[in-house]
């Protein structure tokens, strides 16, 4: 009797354990529910469909004047006057500084007198040669006398040319006493004040910067260039003919610059210091909104991914081996799929360059509660009209 009483509770315990097994003790054919008896996770999916997507590339750049000229005097003298406003606009040919012209005026007058004297000597030599010519023909003068007269005329002609060259030089130096702006632009501060002795071109007086059009210098990293070249060669990326991207700028405060430009220089060399390829863009700057030296974000537009695959940002996860997404497998379970993510698309989605095929279903919502092999249930999409009516029936919030 004691043995029979002991076996009864043991049999009840065995039946209870069998009822808690994964099959529940009822599905002997192995067709029971998911492991542990948990229902499939409800998820939202999107079907992969390649499409053409424009892409933009963004870099950090710095503005610079399209022409930056150092203004220097060409002659030595005393600086008499500054003829411009520091930091103000100047026109090409405008006088910026005046150097004392008195010594150069005297030199010009002296050179002009030398020209007159040389011309008088030349006329005298010509008359002598003209008189000697018929006399020489009649053998009235010697060969030497006639040759001396002709030579004197030639020497006089050369002296006139030399005197005229000295006069032109004197007039040039006199004109250089007015230091003019070589280009139109914005003048810098004056580095020499009135009364200073200027010793010629070795003294910098000021600078003029032409800011319309304005240049933007930026660097394209070598690894980015190599990746883009590889995608272009593979046919996954198309760029404008000749690399003529449309260039737009974003200012430091996030404000977009209203004008667009084009690339006008790309260096073939890679900088050893920065590992970037120097590139330059040119943009109009008629209203002077941009100033040389500003830091801006340069956006290159015009490239296109002709058959791009995009997925929302929330669907891309990061694992030990890199980025991956969950796709719905043939048996209705979640499968982890490694992917290669490229640039961002305009809507904030990832552009997937490798890892997904057309027609595959990528899990978008509900990925945080999944694991490889977990059963999933695809949620039915809600009609847009239903969502709007629900929003309309929602009572207003209490203030």
Image (cartoon, grey):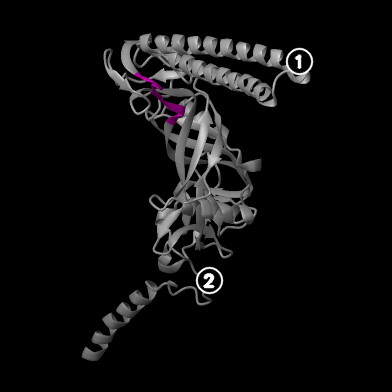
Say above or below: 167 vs 276. above
Q: In the image, residue 69 lies at what x, y percent?
A: 43, 26
Real-space Cα distance between discs 1 and 2?
138 Å
Q: Residue at x 56, y 63 (%)?
A: 329
**Furthest residue toward left:** 2
Say above or below: 281 vs 188. below
**Residue 92 in view in this figure:** no
The quadrant of the image that shows the N terminus is bottom left
**Residue 280 in view in this figure:** yes
Q: Is residue 89 left or right of residue 8?
A: right
For mark 1, what is the residue?
134
Q: In the image, residue 282 lies at what x, y percent?
A: 52, 31
Q: Residue at x 56, y 65 (%)?
A: 331
Residue 271: assigned label: none
Q: In the image, residue 121 lies at what x, y percent?
A: 57, 13
Majority secondary structure of magenta residues: strand
The residue range painted magenta reads 64-76
Residue 31: assigned label: 2
**Furthest residue toward front:** 140
Q: Residue at x 59, y 18 (%)?
A: 156
Depth check, front residue: 174 or 350? 174
């Amino acid at each position: 009797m004691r043995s029979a009483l002991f076996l009864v509770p043991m049999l009840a315990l065995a039946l209870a354990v069998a009822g808690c097994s994964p099959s529940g003790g009822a599905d002997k054919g192995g067709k029971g529910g998911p492991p542990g008896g948990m229902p499939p996770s409800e998820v939202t999916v999107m079907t992969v469909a390649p499409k053409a997507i424009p892409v933009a590339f963004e870099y950090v750049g710095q503005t610079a004047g399209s022409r930056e000229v150092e203004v220097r005097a060409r002659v030595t003298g005393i600086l008499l006057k500054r003829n411009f406003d520091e930091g103000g606009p100047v026109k090409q040919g405008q006088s910026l500084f005046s150097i004392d012209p008195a010594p150069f005026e005297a030199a010009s007058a002296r050179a002009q007198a030398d020209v007159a004297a040389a011309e008088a000597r030349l006329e005298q030599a010509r008359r002598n040669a003209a008189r000697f010519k018929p006399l020489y023909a009649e053998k009235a003068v010697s060969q030497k006398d006639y040759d001396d007269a002709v030579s004197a005329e030639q020497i006089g002609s050369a002296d006139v040319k030399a005197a005229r060259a000295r006069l032109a030089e004197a007039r040039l130096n006199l004109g250089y006493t007015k230091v003019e702006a070589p280009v139109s632009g914005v003048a810098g501060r004056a580095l020499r004040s009135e009364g200073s002795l200027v010793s010629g071109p070795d003294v910098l007086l000021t600078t003029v910067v032409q800011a319309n059009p304005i240049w933007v210098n930026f660097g394209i990293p070598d690894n980015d260039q190599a990746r883009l070249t590889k995608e272009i060669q593979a046919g996954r990326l198309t760029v404008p003919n000749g690399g003529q991207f449309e260039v737009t700028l974003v200012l430091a405060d996030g404000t977009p610059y209203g004008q667009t430009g084009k690339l006008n220089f790309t260096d073939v060399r890679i900088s050893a210091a920065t590992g970037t390829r120097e590139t330059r863009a040119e943009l109009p700057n008629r209203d002077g909104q941009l100033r040389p030296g500003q830091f801006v974000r340069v956006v290159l537009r015009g490239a296109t991914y002709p058959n791009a695959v995009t997925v929302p940002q929330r669907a891309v996860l990061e694992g030990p081996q890199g980025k991956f997404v969950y796709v719905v497998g043939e048996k209705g379970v979640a499968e982890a799929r490694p992917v290669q993510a490229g640039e961002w698309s305009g809507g904030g989605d990832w552009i997937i360059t490798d890892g997904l095929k057309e027609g595959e279903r990528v899990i978008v919502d509900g990925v945080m509660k999944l694991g490889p092999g977990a059963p999933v249930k695809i949620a039915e999409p809600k009609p847009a009209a239903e969502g709007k009516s629900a929003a309309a029936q929602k009572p207003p919030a209490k203030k």
